[in-house]
């Protein structure tokens, strides 16, 4: 029984038959199995939304499974698209479950005991005595406000999905990304570890005071050392409890200590009402007569104490709000328990703190309140002092135990996410409940070192900044997630507001800055951790952070705003579309020389898109589309260094039509490529069909790509063939009829014409693979000093120096190259005043092609040697170069020390200039300096000169010698040099200008003519355009054979020109040892000299 797409589209469950089985279905593992049909529809279930590799996760059927077994869609449908363990006989893995605490014991009790800790019993009286009741109320309410806003933000985050182990770290990292999460998580772990010391030091201080009262002042050494000793004993005992029983034993102890805490508080409040006049000798007053209330309302700070000092001492008391979140992995329902339990604990603790501050100020003198070293005011007031001491011990030990249990779990979560490679040893756990043993040891060590400080007042401000920064980022994460407007941000908790969260973040930062030294140290530590993750560890994780959502919104908004702004030539930047040859596959994208070269050209910071055409049909090969995009993007990002480029893939049976699809659809809005990059077809002559006559472009891909199912399979296999160097790419291998060779000349000409037709500039690169190898060798083996063109201080003259003379900076490049740089130059560098040999005369068509305003007087044909010599001699005697200083009066003059130049023609200043230029060229044409030659033959809008300028901005090409070569004739050399120099100066492009006399050669070499006729399959005849290009190709060979890279203006492939003839032009123009780039703009200006 086959599958019917039509019946599936109509929603019918079965196919064929009488439908007797259509009403019977069964649900198993979230999948509804339709017996009457060949497919099965999944019912909505959580098993399909779990993370990959999670326990109980199942794979949702793919579209190709539901559509049926279409050719090219990936083969046979999966008979069981779900997890094989869900229906088969395999054993289902059993997840290790945490303790599954509820809201009261897991969150409320833990948070309340942490908040009502050592500060309440040992320092609240000192704060009230210094700040007074009013300011103490403000400190408590301000702290409660910060923690309440943070809890609201925390509630919104933790109800936006399931919360795993890690608490605050998990929430920040999943909301703001691994960089923020790792930096704050590690800092928060340190804060919790230091908090252990805070609470055990409080325990030691209470122990010393209790022994002083009940044991006659028993001391082992001194009060300071006794506090430290008792604190360390308590810390080691608590560590033993944590290792032996873990979180479960901690919860049992927390419940017991809660009872002790309640009794201690009752003893205090009852004792307030039992005071009378007899207690005044102890610094206490009765409540009936107003007591000390009037004296203690206002502040009276001790020397060196401010209200911020008091706030810094108090604030660590309220940092216990994260005690429940720290064990989020051990809660049964963390999304419900954390918001409710934390808010209930904040409300109850705030009422208790306000009540205690009021009664302390009402019944205690200020002297007694501030004397915390000798007196515990809460103990003096209570009805049963022993209960208060028990409450102090319960509060300090329970808080220390909570931090000792929570901190290692934060470290465990960070280590398991592998954000810091040096923390990998701490990712291991032990026991049935995954206890972080190594984390306990680290927490104990940090607490031990901090405890040696032995002073609550010195420890409290240290951890306050850590907690404040953590709370600030929780609030910021909530606000950022809202402003990111991601559809995935759907908190289940309703009582929150992004602007309130932002206010909470600002409050946290404002409080931090009051201790600017500690705040600066905290920010430096977190910033260093952030940069470490970003630049060193570079974790391969994607958690869908709020930053990613905001980045997407900014990108969309920028595209819309950019669309409304008209383009301007000053803001033009090349944006490239790299067209891959047929035989290049995305598997080898990172090895493609053209891709690497284009990345070097992207100093304009435009977009780079790599276009790839899969030869096939959409119905058969659509499954390869996304795979090719993913593989290509991966290969680009994993290059060294990574290449900033996008990948675009289309499917078409014709390569030409596929490229045309890319030309039309690539990009969005103003972010569209404007320059096409092509590989030169090295084997174009071996490619078979060359159009000898001008014919309309034919779609040959559809003919060659027709085939049966085996042909389609062959196409799919070709996606993984190995491709040789792009300069040596061979025709298609094997029996694959779906691919044509790289030598398909007609297809290449068609896509170039299509690019021009789309209004784009075109670059054709020959030997891009060799160019990449050369660039890599320079980058690895050459020092920075070798890249720098030698300056005045670097020239070591062996000949005596002539007196200094003023010389225009650009005059030094009159000669094309030195003989040292080019062996072919010795015979071509004849004195300019000599008679040039016979050569081609310019006819009107050639003059138009060159853009020359003045040509030979005879209008065409060959000239006799005598006439030419006489003409040249006459012209040179009146050469414009005699007026050298006048021509360059506007240019910047520099003084150069030149070596003595022998055999200077006193009667011809042009010869003097040429000799001087050759001397400078000899100095600067060092073998270790890369040279970029640019043959700017026609005005295409400036793209030909802009691209090499941008290439020199890349670090590999930054020190390259930059030469612009221009062609002139007869006596126009000086005039052409002056014209080109001024033009480049207007465009602020610093380059050497070289003027080449194209009449210095005799008639075209027979080998050049013979090769042209062989390549094009036609005769040369009297075609002036062909003779011009052949003449230029010979000049390029002579002048640029030793350059590192050559840019040449690309001839336009006019429709009236046979394809083979145009290909023969560009083949000869690029037939050099160095790589050659043919460039042609779209005839629109890309340069301007206006501001």
Image: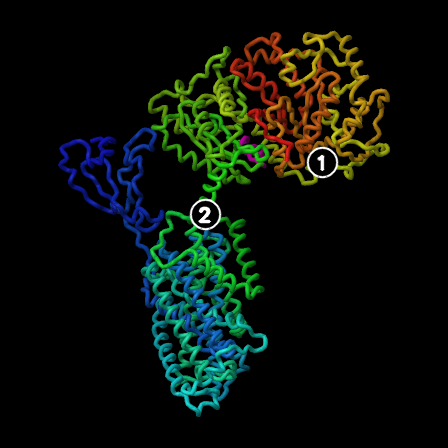
Q: Main secondary structure of the magenta part?
A: helix
Asked if residue 240 can be seen in this view, the reply is no
The relative height of residue 45 versus residue 248 in the rendered view (above or below) is above
Magenta stretch holds residue 743? no
- Where disc 2 sits, the SS reads helix
Rendered location of residue 434, percent (x, y): 38, 60
Say which residue label 2 marks: 550
The relative height of residue 441 versus residue 275 in the rendered view (above or below) is above
Residue drawn at 51 percent across, 17 percent down: 686
Residue drawn at 42 percent across, 20 percent down: 701
- Where disc 1 sits, the SS reads loop
| The label number, if any, that marks residue 789 in the structure image | 1
Magenta stretch holds residue 596? yes
Q: Magenta region: which residues?
A: 593-603
Q: Residues within 10 Å of mark 1 (few under 14, many from 20)?
A: some
Rendered location of residue 675, percent (x, y): 53, 29
CA–CA distance in space, label 2 to label 1: 45 Å
């Amino acid at each position: 029984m086959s599958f019917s797409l039509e019946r599936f589209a109509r929603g019918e469950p079965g196919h064929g038959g009488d439908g007797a089985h259509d009403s019977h279905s069964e649900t198993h593992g979230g999948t509804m199995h339709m017996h009457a049909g060949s497919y099965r529809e999944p019912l909505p279930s959580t098993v399909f939304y779990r993370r990959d590799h999670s326990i109980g996760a199942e794979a949702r059927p793919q579209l190709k499974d539901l559509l049926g077994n279409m050719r090219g869609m990936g083969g046979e449908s999966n008979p069981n698209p779900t997890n094989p363990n869900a229906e088969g006989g395999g054993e289902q893995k059993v997840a290790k479950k945490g303790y599954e605490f509820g809201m009261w014991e897991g969150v409320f009790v833990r948070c309340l005991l942490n908040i009502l800790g050592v500060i309440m019993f040992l320092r609240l009286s000192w704060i009230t005595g210094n700040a007074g009741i009013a300011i103490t109320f403000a400190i408590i309410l301000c702290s409660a406000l910060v923690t309440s806003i943070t809890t609201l933000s925390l509630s919104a985050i933790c109800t936006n999905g399931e919360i795993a182990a890690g608490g605050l770290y998990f929430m920040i990292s999943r909301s703001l990304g691994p960089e923020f999460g790792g930096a704050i998580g590690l800092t928060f772990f340190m804060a919790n570890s230091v908090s252990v010391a805070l609470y055990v030091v409080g325990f030691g201080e209470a122990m010393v005071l209790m022994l002083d009262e009940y044991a006659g002042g028993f001391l082992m050494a001194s009060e300071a050392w006794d506090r430290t000793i008792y604190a360390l004993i308590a810390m080691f005992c608590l560590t033993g409890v944590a290792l032996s029983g873990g979180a479960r034993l901690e919860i049992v102890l927390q419940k017991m200590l809660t009872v002790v805490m309640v009794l201690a508080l009752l003893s205090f409040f009852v004792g307030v009402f039992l005071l009378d006049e007899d207690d005044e000798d102890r610094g206490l007053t009765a409540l009936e007569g107003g007591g000390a209330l009037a004296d203690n309302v206002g502040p009276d700070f001790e020397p060196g104490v401010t209200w911020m000092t008091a706030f810094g001492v108090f604030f660590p008391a309220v940092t216990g709000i994260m005690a429940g979140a720290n064990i989020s992995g051990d809660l049964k329902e963390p999304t419900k328990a954390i918001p409710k339990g934390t808010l209930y604990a904040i409300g109850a603790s705030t009422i208790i703190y306000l009540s205690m501050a009021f009664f302390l100020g009402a019944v205690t003198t200020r002297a007694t309140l501030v004397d915390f070293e000798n007196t515990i005011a809460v103990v003096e007031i209570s009805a049963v002092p022993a209960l208060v001491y028990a409450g102090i011990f319960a509060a300090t030990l329970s808080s220390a135990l909570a931090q000792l249990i929570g901190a290692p779990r934060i470290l465990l979560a960070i280590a398991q996410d592998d954000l810091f490679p040096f923390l990998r040893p701490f990712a291991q756990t032990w026991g049935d409940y995954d206890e972080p043993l190594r984390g306990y040891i680290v927490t104990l060590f940090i607490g031990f070192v901090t405890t040696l400080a032995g002073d609550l007042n010195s420890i409290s401000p240290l951890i306050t900044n850590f907690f404040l920064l953590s709370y600030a980022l929780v609030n910021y994460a909530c606000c950022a997630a809202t402003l990111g407007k991601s559809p995935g941000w759907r908190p289940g908790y309703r009582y929150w507001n992004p602007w309130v969260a932002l206010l909470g973040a600002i409050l946290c930062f404002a409080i931090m800055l009051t201790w600017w030294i500690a705040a600066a140290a905290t920010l430096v530590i977190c910033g260093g951790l952030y940069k470490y993750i970003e630049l060193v560890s570079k974790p391969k994780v994607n958690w869908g952070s709020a930053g990613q959502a905001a980045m997407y919104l900014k990108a969309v908004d920028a595209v819309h705003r950019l669309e409304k702004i008209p383009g301007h030539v000053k803001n033009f930047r090349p944006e490239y579309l790299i067209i891959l040859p047929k035989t290049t596959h995305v598997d080898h994208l990172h090895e493609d020389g053209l891709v690497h070269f284009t990345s070097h050209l992207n100093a304009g910071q435009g977009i780079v898109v790599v276009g790839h055409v899969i030869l096939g049909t959409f119905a058969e090969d659509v499954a390869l589309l996304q795979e090719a995009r993913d593989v290509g993007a991966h290969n680009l990002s994993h290059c060294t260094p990574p290449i900033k480029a996008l990948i675009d893939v289309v499917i078409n049976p014709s390569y030409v039509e596929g490229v045309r699809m890319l030309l039309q659809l690539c990009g969005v809005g103003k972010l569209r490529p404007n320059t096409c990059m092509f590989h030169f077809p090295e084997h174009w002559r071996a490619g078979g069909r060359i159009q000898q006559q001008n014919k309309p472009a034919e779609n040959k891909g559809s003919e060659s790509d027709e085939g049966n199912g085996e042909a389609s399979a062959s196409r799919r296999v070709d996606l993984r063939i190995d491709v040789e160097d792009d300069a040596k790419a061979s025709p298609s291998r094997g029996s694959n009829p779906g691919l044509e060779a790289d030598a398909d000349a007609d297809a290449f000409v068609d896509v170039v014409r299509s690019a021009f037709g789309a209004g784009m500039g075109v670059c054709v690169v020959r030997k891009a693979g060799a160019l990449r190898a050369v660039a890599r060798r320079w980058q690895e083996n050459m020092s920075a000093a070798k890249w720098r063109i030698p300056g005045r201080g670097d020239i070591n003259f062996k000949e005596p120096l002539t007196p200094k003379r003023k010389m225009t900076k650009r005059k030094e490049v009159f000669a094309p190259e030195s003989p040292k740089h080019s062996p072919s130059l010795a015979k071509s560098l004849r004195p300019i005043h000599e008679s040039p040999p016979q050569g081609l005369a310019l006819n009107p068509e050639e003059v138009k092609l060159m853009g020359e305003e003045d040509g030979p007087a005879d209008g065409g044909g060959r000239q006799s040697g005598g006439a030419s010599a006489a003409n040249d001699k006459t012209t040179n005697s009146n050469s414009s170069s005699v007026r050298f200083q006048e021509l360059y009066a506007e240019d910047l003059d520099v003084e150069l020390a030149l070596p003595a130049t022998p055999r200077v023609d006193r009667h011809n200043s042009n010869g003097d200039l040429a000799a001087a230029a050759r001397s400078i060229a000899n100095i600067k044409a060092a073998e270790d300096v890369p040279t970029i030659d640019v043959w700017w033959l026609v005005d295409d809008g400036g793209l030909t000169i802009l691209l090499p300028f941008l290439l020199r901005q890349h670090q590999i090409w930054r020190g390259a010698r930059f030469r612009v070569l221009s062609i002139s004739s007869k006596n126009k050399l000086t005039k052409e040099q002056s014209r080109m120099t001024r033009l480049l100066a207007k465009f602020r492009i610093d380059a050497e200008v070289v003027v080449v006399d194209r009449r210095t050669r005799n008639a075209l070499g027979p080998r050049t003519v013979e090769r042209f006729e062989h390549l094009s399959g036609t005769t040369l005849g009297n075609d002036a355009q062909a003779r011009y290009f052949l003449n230029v190709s010979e000049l390029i060979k002579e002048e640029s054979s030793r350059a590192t890279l050559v840019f040449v203006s690309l001839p336009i492939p006019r429709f009236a020109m046979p394809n083979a003839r145009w290909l023969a032009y560009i083949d000869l123009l690029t037939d050099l040892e160095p790589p050659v780039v043919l460039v042609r703009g779209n005839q629109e200006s890309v340069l301007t000299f206006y501001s």
